[in-house]
Image (tube, grey):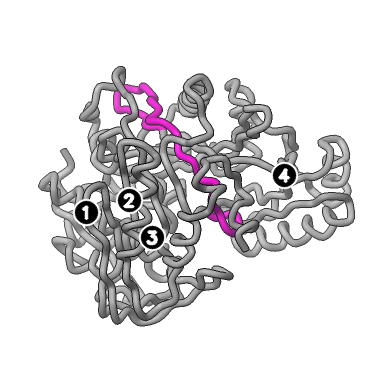
């Protein structure tokens, strides 16, 4: 097993990775910005190195500073977490060229799946269902209009290099497309350095379902079930659950088989997620994208399948067999994750601030992965995620009841937070029925 691990991330995910590393007897090394010096992940690591000021470009995305920290501390491996450099193929190559172990998929897989158009084409060739859309970038507005006319309105306008729900717009007709195309292209150039745009069929009522895959050290790709991710605001997830209440055993079999084919098509190793859109009316699903990293919502899979995905990542990176039998994977019970963000619970606008009170819920089937404690400050420099509240039960009904009790116990004073939104959601008839889609939050607001 790896002996020393540098975690190139921050907050709850850094703290969560450090927890598994220490359980396995691995020396855990944190890197942090000046703004994060007092956060729990820094103090809980065996060693910590400041890599720059608050600006992520000068700290958490500063490749030279992170590699220098790895060298200075004698780190053997680097785990990138999610966000920041986690899906940066050049960083992965640089890490390995430096003689370090990269805890993630190979750089070639990251590159192959990093461009949405290339990924769509690869998946179509591998027999994975893809939504009607462009096979090449819409290089200008005229090309976008022609593509949309062939696909049929409404269409989704997407940044080819985008991710995390960013760089997307919906056009119901040509006039809207002309506006959205320019907006998405400008945003993509500014945020991703790549203004390539693709056009896809837009489904007004759709569910967002994803499959957790793990490429093993022996070359096999296995699927650890699906997660429902349809509770979203601004195309960004707020709640995830596993199994999906929309997926029958027969549909699950098709989902998992397609996800395995997707991983095999790019010789995938380590943890990844195949994201899909599910049309509840027809039970058809379509490939959306592959996230070549550990997902924020991985804990619900851990509960349902009884595995520690970070441990499995480390084992794959070290060339070791998994802790579980790949031929005997079976889900048990139900798990739900709620993303506790520093944001207004009505309009979901960021609300950073100093935390004066932080009381986490506890009890049977309750887990909190948090990045903060009382006395810390949520700064405006990073994502608004403060913690993840994960609950599990023998079935969805029990998990929902435990979620209600846990939300009622969660006390945060200081920054604005969305705990009140979850209290509302967990009493919502549409959510409770399990028959909801990506429009549920907008209908609540």
Q: Residue at x 34, y 73 (%)?
A: 412
- For numbered disc 1, what is the local secondary structure? loop
Between the C-alphas of marks 1 and 3, the distance is 41 Å
Residue 363 - label: 1
Which is nearer the N-term, disc 1 or disc 2?
1
Question: Residue 279, position in %: x, y?
Answer: 65, 34
Residue beneath disc 4? 204
User: Circles 1 and 3: CB distance less than 8 Å?
Assistant: no
Is residue 225 a member of the stretch shown in magenta? yes
Between the C-alphas of marks 3 and 2, the distance is 42 Å
Between the C-alphas of marks 2 and 4, the distance is 32 Å
Which is nearer the N-term, disc 2 or disc 4?
4
Q: Residue at x 52, y 48 (%)?
A: 431
- For numbered disc 4, what is the local secondary structure? loop
- For numbered disc 3, what is the local secondary structure? helix
Residue beneath disc 3? 63
Question: Residue 84, position in %: x, y?
Answer: 43, 58
Looking at the picture, does residue 351 appear above or below residue 43? below
Residue beneath disc 2? 402
Q: Tell me, yes or no, if residue 3 can be seen here.
A: yes
Q: Residue at x 24, y 62 (%)?
A: 30
- For numbered disc 2, what is the local secondary structure? helix
Residue extent of the magenta highlight: 213-236
Between the C-alphas of marks 1 and 2, the distance is 9 Å
């Amino acid at each position: 097993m790896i002996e020393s691990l540098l975690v190139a991330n921050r907050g709850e995910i850094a703290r969560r990775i450090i927890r598994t590393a220490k359980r396995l007897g691995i020396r855990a090394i944190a890197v942090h910005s000046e703004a994060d010096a007092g956060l729990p992940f820094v103090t809980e690591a065996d060693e910590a190195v400041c890599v720059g000021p608050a600006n992520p470009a000068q700290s958490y995305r500063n490749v030279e500073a992170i590699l220098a920290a790895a060298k200075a501390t004698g780190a053997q491996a680097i785990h990138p977490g999610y966000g920041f450099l986690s899906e940066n193929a050049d960083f992965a190559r640089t890490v390995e060229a430096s003689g370090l172990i990269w805890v993630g998929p190979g750089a070639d897989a990251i590159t192959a799946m990093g461009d949405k158009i290339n990924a769509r084409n690869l998946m179509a060739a591998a027999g994975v269902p893809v939504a009607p859309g462009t096979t090449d970038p819409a290089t200008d507005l005229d090309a976008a209009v022609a593509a949309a006319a062939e696909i049929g309105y409404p269409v989704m306008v997407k940044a080819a290099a985008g991710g995390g729900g960013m760089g997307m717009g919906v056009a119901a007709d040509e006039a809207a497309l002309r506006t959205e195309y320019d907006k998405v292209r400008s945003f993509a150039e500014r945020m991703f350095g790549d203004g390539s745009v693709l056009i896809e069929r837009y489904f007004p009522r759709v569910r967002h379902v994803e499959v957790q895959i793990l490429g093993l050290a022996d070359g096999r790709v296995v699927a650890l079930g699906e997660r429902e991710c349809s509770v979203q605001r601004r195309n960004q997830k707020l709640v995830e659950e596993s199994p999906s209440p929309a997926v029958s055993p027969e549909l699950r079999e098709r989902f998992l088989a397609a996800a395995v084919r997707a991983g095999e098509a790019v010789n995938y190793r380590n943890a990844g997620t195949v994201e899909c859109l599910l049309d509840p009316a027809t039970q058809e699903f379509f490939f959306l994208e592959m996230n070549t990293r550990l997902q924020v919502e991985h804990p619900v899979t851990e509960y349902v399948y009884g595995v520690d995905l970070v441990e499995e990542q480390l084992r794959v990176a070290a060339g070791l067999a998994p802790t579980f039998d790949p031929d005997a994977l079976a889900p048990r019970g139900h798990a739900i994750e709620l993303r506790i963000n520093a944001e207004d619970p009505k309009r979901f606008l960021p609300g950073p601030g100093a935390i004066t009170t932080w009381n986490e819920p506890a009890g049977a089937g309750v887990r909190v992965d948090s990045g903060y404690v009382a006395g810390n400050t949520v700064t405006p420099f990073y994502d608004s995620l403060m913690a993840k509240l994960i609950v599990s039960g023998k079935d969805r009904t029990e998990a929902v009841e435990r979620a209600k009790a846990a939300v009622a116990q969660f006390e945060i004073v200081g920054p604005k937070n969305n705990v009140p939104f979850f209290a509302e959601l967990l009493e919502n008839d549409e959510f409770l029925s399990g028959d909801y889609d990506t429009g549920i939050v907008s209908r609540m607001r």
